[in-house]
């Protein structure tokens, strides 16, 4: 299958051979639905491209942390890239061995580091001198030696949205190559940290190879410099960020084979282990958000298509002005109209699309918002006291509920009225 095309099972009214109209009738809307077959196909395609390479694919759990999704990764032998104790807990519970987990992120607390050390996390990606010193202190107190990589900031423009760019000098992630060089030169000062890895991640939704090649070239040059200086580099983590098709006919994702070829070309002669951290690439196009039209509201200059999903289910358009393809689940044959597709939340930013051409819609019509397998449910909220939506996993004609729709009682389970005032 050409990975730039949608899976054959993803027809007008079916995803992974499941009837979406019947599914929405049974499960209600808004509803997140994910194709297990599409996720497995994307995993297998990447693993096939890496065949013959000592590589570990670590799923970036933040993309979609549902246990059933992470279990699909575990079943294919993937590791995980995490950024919190909560993600560590989820990944371990889903069956990913701690030895296959890398802990990234700029804000790891001493408590989170201690929990990760106790679990036996395979590697820490360090992003500041203070974090290096904290890891040394916590590891020494635990009587263990932590394995770590330094995240370098290659100062490369990822050519993506500013809010998901992470590899420029002005971004909060990583350290300069000069600082990383000093870490290796003074590694003896940190006897409980085995610093033997490099890490770089320049951003998300990358659709061009040029910035990836530029970043890899800087990582490769630094690796060779360290080797010549006598420092052992056991692993190079090339990060993630591979883009997906959000806008059919315009977005052209990088093929897995081309991506892996760029890595192999840049790191020729490297004898250690490669780590990759795809997230969005593995799950985004496998998901759809099903939503019903509540009403059509005429405006002074345009028509508003009000749906029952909101920024609480999918915040990317509000946060990044992100495009998601939207279509009726059942073709209607109605003439085309232009709509602003909006949700019911009391924010003007609760908008999925502006001036979008769709067949004429009416209240009750079922729509699908595509490409929502990543950064939709994982970024959801209960703003406006909207319970979290249900999630279902589809697999060759069958489906399973993998998160039930949150009830009002569950939504306020951690809240209580004042029972007793206290003083500090």
Image (cartoon, helix red, strand yellow):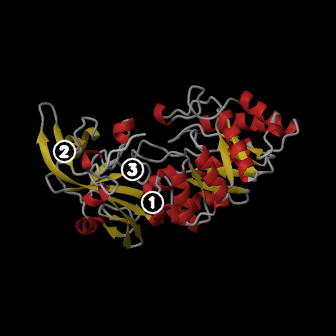
Q: Nearer the viewer, mark 2 or mark 3?
A: 3
Q: For marks 1 and 2, give the CA distance.
A: 30 Å
265 up-or-down from 282: above or below:
above
**Which residue occupies 76% across, 34% down?**
183
Residue 120: quadrant of the picture: bottom right
According to the picture, the residue beneath numbered tag 2 turns out to be 305
Is residue 121 at least partly visible in the picture? no
Q: For marks 3 and 1, give the CA distance.
A: 11 Å
Q: Nearer the viewer, mark 3 or mark 1?
A: 1
- Ranked by sequence position, the earlier of labels 2 and 3 is 2
- Ranked by sequence position, the earlier of labels 3 and 1 is 1
According to the picture, the residue beneath numbered tag 3 turns out to be 376
Secondary structure at badge 1 equals loop
Checking the image for residue 66, the label placed there is 1
Residue 291 place in picture, x, y as percent:
26, 55
Residue 173 place in picture, x, y as percent:
59, 34
Is residue 53 at least partly visible in the picture? yes
């Amino acid at each position: 299958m050409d990975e730039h095309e949608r899976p054959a099972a993803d027809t007008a009214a079916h995803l992974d051979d499941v009837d979406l109209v019947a599914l929405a009738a049974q499960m209600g809307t808004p509803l997140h639905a994910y194709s297990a077959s599409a996720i497995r196909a994307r995993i297998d395609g990447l693993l096939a491209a890496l065949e013959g390479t000592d590589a570990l694919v670590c799923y970036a759990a933040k993309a979609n942390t549902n246990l059933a999704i992470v279990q699909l990764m575990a079943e294919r032998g993937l590791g995980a890239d995490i950024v919190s104790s909560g993600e560590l807990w989820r990944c371990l519970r889903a069956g990913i061995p701690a030895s296959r987990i890398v802990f990234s992120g700029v804000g790891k607390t001493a408590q989170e580091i201690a929990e990760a050390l106790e679990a036996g996390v395979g590697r820490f990606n360090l992003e500041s001198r203070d974090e290096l010193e904290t890891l040394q202190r916590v590891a020494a107190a635990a009587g263990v030696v932590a394995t770590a990589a330094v995240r370098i900031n290659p100062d490369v423009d990822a050519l993506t949205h500013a809010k998901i760019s992470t590899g420029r000098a002005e971004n909060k992630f990583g350290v300069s190559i000069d600082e990383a060089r000093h870490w290796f030169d003074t590694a003896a000062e940190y006897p409980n940290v085995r610093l033997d890895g490099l890490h770089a991640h320049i951003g998300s939704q990358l659709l061009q190879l040029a910035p990836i090649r530029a970043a890899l070239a800087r990582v490769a040059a630094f690796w060779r410099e360290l080797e010549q200086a006598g420092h052992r580099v056991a692993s190079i983590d090339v990060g993630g960020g591979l883009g997906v098709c959000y806008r059919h006919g315009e977005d052209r994702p990088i093929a897995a084979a081309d991506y892996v070829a760029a890595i192999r070309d840049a790191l020729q002669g490297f004898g250690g282990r490669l780590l990759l951290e795809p997230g969005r690439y593995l799950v985004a196009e496998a998901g759809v958000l099903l939503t019903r039209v509540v009403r059509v509201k005429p405006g002074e200059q345009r028509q508003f298509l009000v749906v029952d999903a909101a920024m609480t289910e999918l915040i990317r358009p509000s946060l990044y002005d992100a495009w998601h393809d939207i279509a009726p689940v059942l073709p209607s044959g109605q003439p085309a109209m232009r709509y602003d597709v909006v949700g019911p939340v009391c924010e003007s930013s609760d908008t999925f699309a502006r001036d979008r051409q769709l067949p004429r819609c009416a209240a009750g019509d079922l729509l699908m918002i595509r490409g929502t397998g990543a950064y939709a449910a994982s970024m959801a909220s209960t703003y406006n006291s909207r319970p979290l939506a249900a999630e279902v996993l589809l697999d060759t004609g069958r489906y399973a509920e993998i998160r039930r729709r949150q009830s009002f009682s569950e939504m306020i389970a951690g809240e209580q009225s004042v029972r007793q005032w206290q003083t500090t």
